[in-house]
Image (tube, coloured by chain):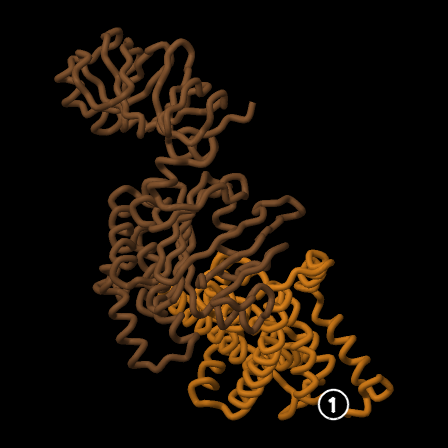
Amino acid sequence: MAEIWQGFLKAIQLIVTLDPEVLEITGRTLAISISSTIIAALMCLPLGSLIHFNNFRGKRTLINLIQTFYSVPTVAVGLIVFLLFSRSGPLGFLELLFTPQVMIIGQVILISPIMLGLVIAALSGVDKAAHETAVAIGASQFQATTIVIREARYAIYSALIMGFGRAISEVGLALMVGGNIRGYTRVMTTAISLETSKGDIVLSIALGIILISLALIINFAFSRLQQRWK
Amino acid sequence: MALLETVSLGHKYDGCPVLKDANLGVNRGEAFGLIGPTGAGKTTLLRLLDFLEVPTSGKIYFEGVDVTLSGKHRLETRRRMAFVQQKPIVFTMSVYDNVACGLRWRREAHDIIRKKVDNALELVNLAEYKNRNAKTLSGGETQRVAIARALVTQPEVLFLDEPTANLDPVSASQVEKVLSNIIQEQRVTVIMATHDMSQGQRLADKIGVLIGGEILQIGSPNEIFCAPKNMEVAEFVGVENILNGVIVEKDDNLVTIQVNDSTIQAVSDCEIGEAVYALIRPEDITFTLAKGRTSARNTFQGKVTRMTPVGPLLRIEVDCGFNLLGVVTKMSAEELDLDIGKKVYASFKATAVHTIKRWT
């Protein structure tokens, strides 16, 4: 118990004194997760709108399929990305394995289904008449789509946050395709995992505190945003 | 040339026809009322006219140009129109932004938008609600936001779908007042669907009766209400005295119609021997206690069989060999001391009888 308490105090010290390694890992984690969230959002928002606003055969099946991938194990995505980018894989020539870039690609694949599914659900939650109302007062198809997305904005924010949450908290994928290389691909989750198994719990606790604090800050900011219009 | 014209316009939903062969023309500045029962196809017709749907058959001309199918024309033409839906929805933004969005989509300058939105909100008496979240408004206020949102774009054609159907009487009369001012002062072309025929009568210059997907009659409110073309229209516009008879005499336009054992006189183009329906509006029947001197050619004695209060009025049913229904004010009923079983004289003019040929 004393060891944990001591570890906790040392961890606070690391954070307060802005320990370079803690800062570096936190910065990299945020950069990778935010990048993958933005890329996934840029893909899922138009794709989700396309699926929502068009009627086609197999739409229901497609949505069911997307929802099935919500809970795809991170290690499964990790394995696929690993095989794709390994030296003998089809994308091996890009030499991206064990780079932050491939971690971003992997995270985009991981969080896209949940983001896409939630974007479609968010758009479906908007009164169907909203799109038509916009068209009836002179909106072009694009403008009408934009207003529906705007109407669904809070649900879409939560889709983004869910995606970001999954990206920042996963460890299997980052470990498999990133390799946890110190100073290059080490992120918070892989660091916690490694340091804990090495028995160095101080850095793990410090990074754990930061990870939880980030979750709290993001959630707090989000609920403030939602309350603004209520 | 009519501003907006339809030729044989038809529409089907899942193969089921909801609008059949609709031909109508609406001139610039006209207030056209589309009346008909719920489910008659009024909303469908408005949606087709505003290009929210593509008709299954027929054509729509705007200023003489066929705009039925052309995608580019449809957006351009739609931007010269505005549609206030039956259950309007507002976007989750301020009242001001809701009204401004139509102008923003048309890329108007900021200061012009501000001026126009303020004017529009003033017009619907919502100026002080400008910064409120539109989602927090009542039904009547929402309807007025929708009207302001439509008017702010200065449309050449304004479509109104049951503008007061979902409102309480106070909000409905406020909205109707706003609409009446717009129709009179702005001379915008208005096409309004309503199942409330008296509202159609109050607001429209011309009325089309749409029943079962077909336009059965187009004419001035007076024509529609006093001279319906057929039984469906007559029943819909509230002609409650519909008598079956045969023309037995004719002198110029004055005909005598045999109804059961009685005869009534009417002004009609029908010929001797023709079977007709004789229609008399309840408001055209007067009741007296004595057979006095009256200019009415038709006077029948009968017994009051039923009295039903309707707002400030009483509906009186009298059996005079055939049933006649009339309305009197409560005060007249008291003066006449009307009661069930009381004998009264019911009179109506020959000109108050409208005849429709009966196909036997």
Q: Residue furthest left?
A: B335
Q: Which quarter of the figure has residue B249? A: top left
Q: Toward the viewer: B148 or B279? A: B279
Question: What residue is drawn where x is 36% and y is 57%?
Answer: B30
Chain at tag 1? A
Q: Toward the viewer: A69 or B295? A: B295
Q: Toward the viewer: B324 or A67? A: B324
Q: Is residue A141 above or below residue B333?
A: below
Question: What residue is drawn where x is 31% and y is 49%?
Answer: B203
Total numbered badges shown on the rendered structure: 1
Left or right of B166? Residue B79 is: right
Q: Is residue A158 above or below residue B26?
A: below
**Residue B341 screen position, x and y as percent:** 26, 6
**Residue B281 screen position, x and y as percent:** 33, 28
Whether residue A174 is visible: yes
Question: What residue is drawn where x is 49% and y is 20%?
Answer: B273
Label 1: how many residues lie within 10 Å, few (<14), some (14-19) or many (20+)? some
Left or right of A87? Residue B207 is: left
Whether residue B308 is visible: no
Left or right of A109? Residue B166 is: left
Q: Which residue is mark 1?
A: A96
The chain assigned the colour orange in the figure is A
The chain assigned the colour brown in the figure is B
Q: Residue furthest front?
A: B252
Question: What residue is drawn where x is 38% and y is 20%?
Answer: B256
Q: Secondary structure at mark 1?
A: loop
Amino acid type, label 1? Leu
Left or right of B328? Residue B88 is: right
**Residue A35 screen position, x and y as percent:** 58, 83
